[in-house]
Image (tube, coloured by chain):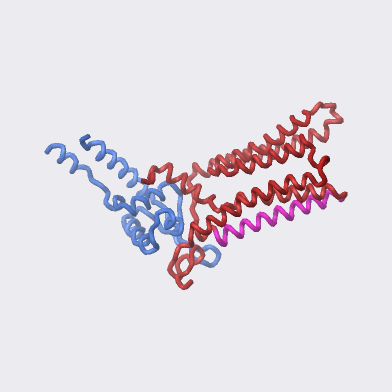
Amino acid sequence: MKRTRELHRVEIDRVIHEPARLVLVAHLYVVESADYVFLMQSTNLTWGNLSSHLLKLEEAGYVEIVKDFVGRKPHTMVKLTAAGRTAFDAYRRQMKELLADLPE
Amino acid sequence: MESIRLRDIERKSWRSQQQGGLIDIQFGIMLVAAAVLAALDEIPMASWVRIVTLSVIASFGAALTYWMRKRYVLPRLGRVKFSTDRVRRTRMMGIMLAACVLLTSSLVVLTALSNRLGVALPGDVGAWLVISAVILVPVAGLAFFLDCPRLFVHGGLFAVVEFLHVVVHLPTRVPFGGVIAYGAAACVSLAVGIGVYIHFLRVVPRPVVPIGEDAEEGADEAN
């Protein structure tokens, strides 16, 4: 019982914990910024799915979506904010704690 | 199950940007330039003609691969800015390439001054080893920093052609021997590059992007 209560004390960031968003944040973590096409190719998400997940991450303050122009055509780049990088680092620590605490 | 280690994700992202085969095509065009120069060596002409020819071919190659990347590769791969660590490695690669250019230039100057200085330069094999090292070191550096092992193939081709040129003296033994050697190597490099490029176009489709959204980087739904 004590072990179960200890497990429940580990708080998981559910914004990042969702599988598609986890892969998305992982890809954004290792680069400076990326556009939608790169993220779609890397995560195998459709445009609609990607937009939906990025919106959630943006609402949480974890990503910044910058709309710019390349020539005269719109171009959108996505980058993790400092809060997003901190949150991802914290999530990694949380998962390590959680998995390390599980019995063999 | 595919690895989701961060280092693997970063490396895979970096390597995905090289999968278009364009660097192989650029190597092939460089070898074509060498073959054309070897052909021009057979014909007496002013040195400025060689320089202009080399410049034209190099410019064509750069323009062609730029257009291919912008028109077909980027819309499939998207744009990404990599971390400062990766950028720093790329800068180190640039420094190494510059050092190799300086080394090559020094060799050319030494060769030109060898008679006056009475300096005994290495024999044919020694010259080949030096030239191959000057070629293979930057190619190996490129292969390492770009995570593109195919570049070792192109570097190896260069070394083989230089062996035929410098040690075997192929141009003096076979009519248009230099053209044949460089041309054959160019065909191999271009075949590899074009093959990789065509494979890339087939396996990586343009993503479907809603009309009005980043129209440069995707096929509109209307298409």
The residue lying furthest to the front in this view is B174
Q: From the viewer's perspective, is A1 left or right of A10?
A: left
Quadrant assignment, res B130: top right
Q: Which residue occupies 49% across, 44% down?
A: B84
| Front residue of this view, candidates B144 and B109 | B144
Q: Which residue occupies 34% across, 50% down?
A: A22
Q: From the viewer's perspective, is B170 left or right of A85?
A: right
Residue A26 horizontal/vertical position (percent):
38, 48
Residue B151 horizontal/vertical position (percent):
60, 43
Q: Which residue occupies 31% across, 55% down?
A: A60
Q: Which residues fall within the magenta stretch? A: B45-72
Q: Is residue B51 magenta?
A: yes
The shade of chain B is red
| Front residue of this view, candidates B223 and A10 | B223
Q: How many marks?
A: 0
Q: From the viewer's perspective, is B78 left or right of B132?
A: left
Residue A50 horizontal/vertical position (percent):
37, 60
